Image (cartoon, grey):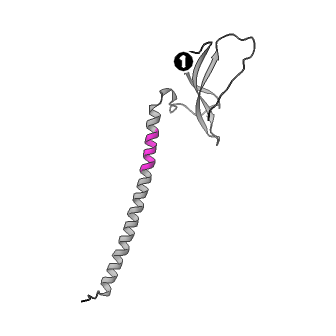
Amino acid sequence: MTQKISKSKKIKQSFWHHHRVFLVFLISFLLVILGLVLVALYGQYQANQYQASLNPFYNTSNLSLNGPVGQVVRSEPLGQTVPGGTAMRIIYRTQKADGSPTFSSGIVFTPTAQSNGPRQVIAWAHG
């Protein structure tokens, strides 16, 4: 026996079918957005945890980026003995490739012996 479905029932079924499809799409879209936000927040959390694990010397949050490029803003003895010299670790102001200000760090080795003339500067940069 075939059951006939009235036209109004077909319209109601079609209406709810389209709404269910829309709701599934909307919920899926919102879950994807939520996932992306959670990934971004977790990445920031990891970066903050890593920054907190570094030696406090490298924390620049209380330093101003305003000032001349190349200016040393923090220095301390490296804690390593260097025969005939001293070793300091420094943080200084510099620029990114786009020209925006940032900080960089380095190590400076200075000879302690007297010199009869100007000293040669040897610089090494990695990366």
Residue at (44% x, 40% y) in the render: 46
- Dot 1 amino acid type: Gln
Residue 39, magenta (yes or no):
yes
User: Which residues are drawn in magenta?
Assistant: 38-47
Q: Residue at x 62, y 39 (%)?
A: 96
Say left or right for 107 vs 21: right
Q: Is residue 110 left or right of residue 29?
A: right
Marks counted in the figure total: 1
Question: Where is mark 1, residue-wise?
Answer: 80
Assign a secondary structure to mark 1.
loop
Residue 68: quarter of image = top right
User: Residue 75: x percent and y percent?
Assistant: 56, 22
* Residue 41, horizontal then vertical, whole percent: 43, 46
Can you say which quadrant of the picture contains the N terminus? Answer: bottom left
Residue located farthest toward the left when viewing the structure as drawn: 1
Q: Closer to the camera, 95 or 49?
A: 49
Horizontal arrangement in the rendering, residue 13 relative to residue 65 (left or right): left
At 50% across and 33% down in the image, what residue appears?
61
Return the x and y of residue 108 as percentages of the image width and height: 61, 22
Residue 23, located in which quarter of the rendered image? bottom left
Q: Residue at x 40, y 59 (%)?
A: 30
